[in-house]
Image (spheres, rainbow, N blue to C red):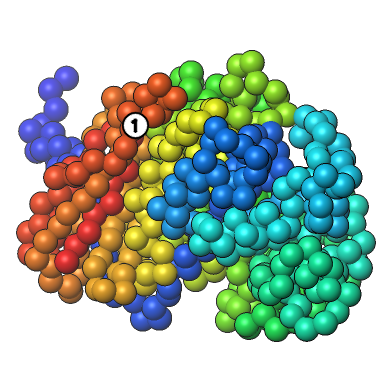
Amino acid sequence: MKKPLLFLMALGMLNAASAQNTVQLEASKNPVTINKNIYGHFAEHLGRCIYDGFYVGEGNKQIPNTNGVRNDIIAALKKLKVPILRWPGGCFADTYHWKNGIGDKSKRPSMVNTWWGNVTEDNSFGTHDFLNMCKEIGAEPYLSGNVGSGEVQELADWVQYVNYDAKSPMSDLRRKNGQDKPWKVKYWGVGNEAWGCGGNMTADYYKDIYRKYATFMSDPGVDGGLFKIASGASDDDYHWTETLMRDIPNHMLQGVAMHHYSVDWNHKSSATKFNEDEYFKTMKSALFMDELVIKHSAIMDKYDPKKKIALVVDEWGGWYDVEPGTNPGFLYQQNTMRDAMIAGCTLNIFNNHADRVRLACLAQAVNVLQAVILTKGNKIIETPTYHVMEMYNVHQDATLIPIQVKSENYVHNGKALPAVSASASKDKVGSTHISLVNIDPVKKQTITIDLGDEAYKTVTGRILKSAKLQDFNSFDKPNEIHPQVFNGAKLNAKNLTVEIPPFSVVVLELK
Ligand code: AHR
């Protein structure tokens, strides 16, 4: 049957109208700073993250190091501007007894790392090693305290050991071990995943445990006091957040954590040999972060309307099958353009919710899960995720520019996800940065950006792209995927038109 011309024209116009990507930059009534700690990382005693990752030992003559920590990793993480580093776990934290990791290394007791491969942990990398390494990197340390198998006194002692300047039992011990001045560690996790590996507690039980432990973590002269973070919910366990927010007095709590991995727990795909079904599921799980942040924040708003307490997403990232032939307990996985998509979208979500999300840690920094660095002997790789985090570091401590995004759909097997994700900020010297991600593995996107009232003279940009979604940097070709100059943005008065290729990440700078 012939369709009337007018109907066809109208349909065409409708398609054209709905097939548009638009980003509207808006003026902010209450300016919000994107806390640089959103760009944090996580280093656990797990697999090859610390040993044979960060730490190769003081005596190592093959791999240049500073006090046993690889110089190439220190340099790469400095370039990344890592603001904060969480340690020693994860699940490991609730088995870790910090006093076993101080003093003469040859005399330290060993333990079994029961969560991760049942390997022997010789405690040769301990508190001094970690805190001095953070100094080298220029990152704030974030220590996870043991509440699962540790004692209140043990955690109170750790605080005193690393923070107390005047004479005390623990500062005397620190001095005996060669560190005169305290490190003044501000960020402290009170347990990890208390609902699971941290003790299989109920929210109701943990909230009292938190109150007890936090009471004895006294604040010996850290500027602004300690920043104590309660072990938070897994994914959409909103009851957990509700219980902590309702039953812990606000003044005892500076952050509430939440963990979310981009994973299908029933079917973890290969990190590199995945199909589009698996890609779609990963991205759906990654984008779910937005709903999680909104819903956990709404609960927090009820009890803390002034948003004094931070939502701390201190574990996030993609989780796949381990690389064939590697220890299943070591969680070593390669890192492809799929991971770049996860990183770009997740960081946009955090930026856009910077009023509540003020600390986050990618899991994990080196050789574990969605790592920014992989190592093999004396070689290292900076992964696609590394490059996204480096491109995005322009947002650190910048002022968020609120945006409205209208996106075309990325459709797969009749299911849809928004293809375009974005965030924007203005830095201290007045440059505006807009980060854009197109997760569609096939279609490029044309995006019209309304720049609002600002007048700009120039636009420049960088792009991370590759020929195949499954591409990665290997030890033979470590630089296959790296940021390149992007010329696909056209500035026209107060509008910008950007053409962004499939599965790519772009960061624009406007002056
Ligand atoms: O990052 C790996 C593990 O994932 C952490 O140890 C734990 O907290 C989470 O379940």
Q: Amino acid at mark 1?
A: Asn
Q: Quadrant of residue 364?
A: top right
Please name the residue shown 32% across and 28% down the image.
Answer: 480
Please name the residue shown 55% across and 28% down the image.
Answer: 377
Percent from the top left, x then y, of residue 63? 54, 36
Q: Quadrant of the N terminus?
A: top left
Please name the residue shown 64% across and 15% down the image.
Answer: 325
Q: Nearer the viewer, residue 365 or 462?
A: 365
Q: Quadrant of the C terminus?
A: bottom left
Q: Which residue is mark 1?
A: 479
Percent from the top left, x then y, of residue 304? 64, 78
Q: Is residue 284 found left or right of 132 in the rendered image? A: left
Q: Quadrant of residue 403?
A: bottom left
Which residue is most to the top? 325
Percent from the top left, x then y, of residue 439? 36, 37
Does the image show residue 146?
yes
Please name the residue shown 70% across and 24% down the image.
Answer: 328
Does the image show residue 197?
no
Figure label count: 1
Q: Quadrant of residue 3?
A: top left
Residue 20's place in the image compared with 253, above or below, is above
Residue 380's place in the image compared with 219, above or below, is above
Ligand 1 within 8 Å, label 1 CB: no
> Element at badge 1?
loop
Q: Is residue 309 found left or right of 448 in the rendered image? A: right
Percent from the top left, x then y, of residue 113? 82, 37
Residue 255's place in the image compared with 505, above or below, is below
